[in-house]
Every structure is written in structure tokens, then in C-alpha cells.
Image (cartoon, rainbow, N blue to C red):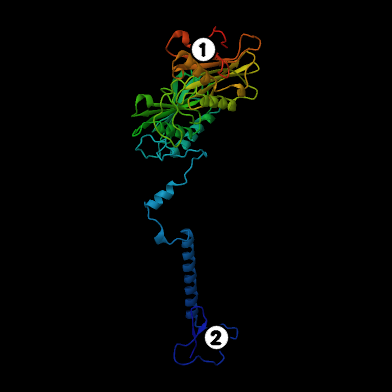
């Protein structure tokens, strides 16, 4: 009887009761018998082997693709686990501390609070490509006077400079519409490189944090423009619908940070906090006249000032401040908003001398002086203060000394204007004995 073979051509025991033949017809090397299996059996063995190898390889690939997890253990589409994983670990494209959602998990950008259309230029995923498409349409040397981003379109007033013809570019649904305006540019403009695609997201997220609980606004549009002084830095503004008029406009710097309410300059809550901010009054609340806030104002300007600049004048109101510096015969004025955002306001020439180092400005001076004024006038001077001005003395004039000028609102006119020393310890009305 011929021996039986497995699919790989190896001899196997005969399943019959008879023992296998030991006639010596098996290959000494352990292979198939000398005569070999029939051709049909050999072909069947090869095909079977290929099928088994392919099946094993496919199973291994499937296990690798699923991360070693059995398909029956993976969450189905739309399950809670899948939604959680897809929403975790997200971050902004530019590495900013605020992601596409604000810290409380609400959408930071949307044309409408209920709108989930990602094609809107206001949506984080669409804003970057929209800005890139706009830049691609500009010619070398083009500048932007005003950029507006609406829920359904993006528009830009483009010029070559002040008093030059304007043309308008509109980007809608991926198409670009061009038109020539029948007017010339009357405002300062900015280069396309100043447009930060992530800035509107930051701005709107901050504005939403500053609304009353239960508000459901939608974004009318956001705009980037420069003030009427050529040295101004561009600023972003967002306009909201379905909110009180006082909450309808919010402004931030060119990066969309340091956001304040446009109606009164109150700073928006920081990330992680929420609620409508209270309007700063006098030296209370978030007023910049308070010692801790004034110190931050001076430090923020020092961070952006050029080496060697000296402080000549500081004007501080509850919601804004201006710091004027000089270096040689060049003068610069920095504007600081209620959120301690600093922007260059204007630059020019000066013949002034002297000035203070930033470290010499004592932020506690005004508040300390107000405490003394309050005791002398028997009034709440911290609430009544309207603004304070620091004037650096001119070393060429002995009578022109460095002092804080304190202006109060209301009350007896004779008690509205006071002067104090730099540290606020020496206080008096102008002309009084012992007044600075």
C-alpha cells in the first residue's frame, strides 16, 4: 500500500489497522518517498499552503490595524467613548494657551451660537485657509485698510498707502470677488503679515466670557483696523448681536488678547472665569490707578520699550493709560488698555530733557496720596479720583519737579486738584505750604 501524505507532502501514518510499510522506500533525508506523491496531491498541497499563509498574514494585519484590540471591543460610531476621545487633547494651531474652545468648553467662534457649519470664515478650521487665500490675491506692496470677517464672507479694503485708491476684495464660498471703490484711502493701513488667523478666536472667546449668564449671542462680524494715527497698532473688534448695547462691542490687540468692553473699557474675565465685568470707578475694582494695576502698566510698557527709553509722562485713568518716553530727541507714547494691553500710539520728536527710569516710577504713589487726600477732605477720594498724571521734572529748571497730579471729580472745586511726591507721601494743593 502506498503511504499517505499530509498537504505539505510529508508521510503520515496509515489510518488503517495495517502498519506502514517499512520496505525502505522512504527518502533517507526525511522527505517524501522516492516515488513522491501524485502530481494532483502535490498541487493541492501547494495551493492549500498558500491559502493558509495568506489567511494568517491577513489576520496579523487586521490585529495591527486595530491596535491589538478585538473588533468587538471597539466603540461603535457615535458612542460616548468615541466622542470623548475625539474631543480631548485638542490644541490651537499656533500653540496658544486657548484652544478652539474657551476654557469652559463653549465654542470660541461661530457665526451663530447654534451654527455648526465649519465653512464659515469665522470658524477656526476655516479662518486660516480664508486668510491664506486673501494673501494670495494681494499684489506686492498691497496694504489693508480694514479687514472684516462675517459669518458668510471675508472682505478687505486694499490700498497701496494713504490717499491712494482703494479696491475691495470679497472672499465668499471659496470664490474671490474684486471691485474698485470710488474713493481713496483716508486711514492708516497695515501689511498683510499683521493678520493673525488665531486672533479672532481669542477675541470672541474673551467676549463670550464677559457676557451675563444665559446670554446666547451671535457674531455679527469681526474687524481689524488701525486708528487714525499712523503709528497706531492694528486692533481687532468684534460686534455681537442679541446682547445689551453695552456688551455689543469688544476690542483686543493685534493678537486678539488683552480684550476690553468697548463701551467702558472694562477688561474681559481671564480664561477660566466668567461673568459680566464691573465698570472700574476711581481707584476701585480693576482700575488702573490702583497700586498693583499701575505697577503692571509700567512693567508692561517697560517690556516693549526700546533700551534707553526714559519715562517723561504717565496719564492714568481707571480704564486706560498713556506712557510717554524719550530716548535722545525721539519721543514715543504707548497706550495701555484696561486689560494691560500695550500698543504704540504715536511717535515724534521732543526737546525735553530728563526723565525717569522705569524702575523709578512708584506705582503706589497715587493710591497712597488718595488716602491722605481723603482724610483731609473727609471724603472718599479713592472713589472720586478721575485721573492722575505723573510729570517728570526737567533738570534745567529747579521749580519743575517730578510729581503726581491728582484730579478728583465732583465736590468742592478747591479740593479737586492735588499734587504729591513720587512716592505719594508728601501731599498738598498747589500753592499750599509744603506742597510738592
Q: Residues within 10 Å of mark 2 (few under 14, many from 20)?
A: some
Secondary structure under the numbered disc 2 in the rendered image: loop
Q: Which residue is mark 2?
A: 33
Dividing the picture into quadrants, the one containing residue 404 is top right
- For the image, the number of numbered tags is 2
In this rendering, is residue 229 above or below 41? above
Name the element at disc 1. strand
Residue 123 is tagged as none
Crowding around mark 1 (Cα neighbors within 10 Å: few <14, some 14 to 19, many 20+) is many
Of tags 2 and 1, the one toward the viewer is 1
Instruction: Report the residue marked by disc 1.
Output: 418
Left or right: 309, with 170 as reference point: right
In this rendering, does residue 356 appear at all?
A: yes
Residue 366 spot, x, y in % from top left: 52, 19
Q: Is residue 203 left or right of residue 362?
A: left
For the point 53% across and 12% down, the residue is 428
Judging depth in this view, the residue of 363 and 36 nearest the camera is: 363
Query: Percent from the top left, x then y, of residue 198?
Result: 48, 35
Residue 102: x %, y % from top left: 43, 38
Q: Is residue 166 above or below residue 28?
A: above
User: 192 or 46, which lies in front?
Assistant: 192
What's the distance in space between the residues labelled 2 and 1, CA to CA?
119 Å
Q: Earlier in the sequence, mark 2 or mark 1?
A: 2
Comparing 195 with 332, the one in front is: 332
Amino acid at each position: 500500500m502506498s503511504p499517505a501524505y499530509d498537504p505539505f507532502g510529508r508521510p503520515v501514518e496509515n489510518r488503517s489497522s495495517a502498519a506502514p510499510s517499512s520496505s525502505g522506500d522512504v527518502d533517507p533525508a526525511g522527505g517524501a518517498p522516492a516515488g513522491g506523491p501524485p502530481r494532483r496531491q502535490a498541487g493541492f498541497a501547494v495551493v492549500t499552503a498558500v491559502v493558509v499563509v495568506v489567511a494568517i498574514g491577513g489576520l496579523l494585519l487586521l490585529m495591527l490595524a486595530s491596535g491589538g484590540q478585538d473588533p468587538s471591543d471597539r466603540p461603535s460610531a457615535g458612542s460616548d467613548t468615541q466622542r470623548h476621545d475625539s474631543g480631548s487633547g485638542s490644541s490651537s494651531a499656533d500653540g496658544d494657551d486657548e484652544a478652539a474652545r474657551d476654557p469652559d468648553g463653549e465654542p470660541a467662534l461661530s457665526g451663530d451660537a447654534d451654527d455648526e457649519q465649519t465653512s464659515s470664515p469665522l470658524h477656526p478650521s476655516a479662518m486660516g485657509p480664508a486668510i491664506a487665500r486673501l494673501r494670495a490675491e494681494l499684489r506686492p506692496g498691497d496694504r489693508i485698510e480694514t479687514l472684516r470677517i462675517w459669518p458668510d464672507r471675508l472682505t478687505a479694503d486694499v490700498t497701496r498707502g494713504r490717499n491712494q485708491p482703494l479696491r475691495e476684495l470679497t472672499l465668499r464660498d471659496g470664490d474671490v470677488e474684486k471691485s474698485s471703490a470710488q474713493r481713496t484711502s483716508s486711514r492708516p493701513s497695515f501689511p498683510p503679515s499683521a493678520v493673525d488667523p488665531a486672533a479672532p478666536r481669542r477675541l470672541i472667546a474673551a467676549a463670550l466670557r464677559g457676557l451675563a449668564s444665559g446670554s446666547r449671542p451671535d457674531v455679527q462680524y469681526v474687524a481689524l483696523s488701525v486708528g487714525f494715527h499712523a503709528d497706531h497698532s492694528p486692533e481687532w473688534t468684534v460686534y455681537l448681536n442679541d446682547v445689551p448695547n453695552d456688551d455689543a462691542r469688544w476690542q483686543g490687540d493685534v493678537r486678539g488678547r488683552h480684550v476690553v468692553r468697548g463701551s467702558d473699557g472694562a477688561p474681559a474675565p481671564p480664561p477660566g472665569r466668567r461673568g459680566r465685568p464691573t465698570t472700574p470707578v476711581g481707584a476701585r475694582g480693576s482700575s488702573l490707578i490702583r497700586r498693583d494695576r499701575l505697577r503692571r502698566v509700567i512693567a508692561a510698557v517697560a517690556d516693549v520699550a526700546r533700551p534707553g527709553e526714559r519715562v517723561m509722562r504717565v496719564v492714568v485713568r481707571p480704564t486706560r493709560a498713556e506712557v510717554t518716553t524719550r530716548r535722545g530727541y525721539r519721543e514715543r507714547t504707548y497706550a495701555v488698555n484696561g486689560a494691560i494691553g500695550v500698543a504704540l500710539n504715536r511717535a515724534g520728536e521732543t526737546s525735553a530733557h530728563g526723565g525717569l527710569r522705569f524702575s523709578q516710577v512708584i506705582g503706589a504713589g497715587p493710591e497712597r496720596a488718595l488716602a491722605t487726600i481723603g482724610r483731609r477732605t473727609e471724603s472718599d477720594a479713592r472713589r472720586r479720583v478721575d485721573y492722575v498724571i505723573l510729570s517728570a521734572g526737567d533738570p534745567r529748571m529747579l521749580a519743575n519737579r517730578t510729581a503726581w497730579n491728582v484730579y478728583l471729580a465732583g465736590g468742592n472745586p478747591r479740593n479737586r486738584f492735588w499734587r504729591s511726591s513720587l512716592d505719594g507721601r508728601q501731599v498738598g494743593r498747589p500753592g499750599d505750604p509744603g506742597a510738592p
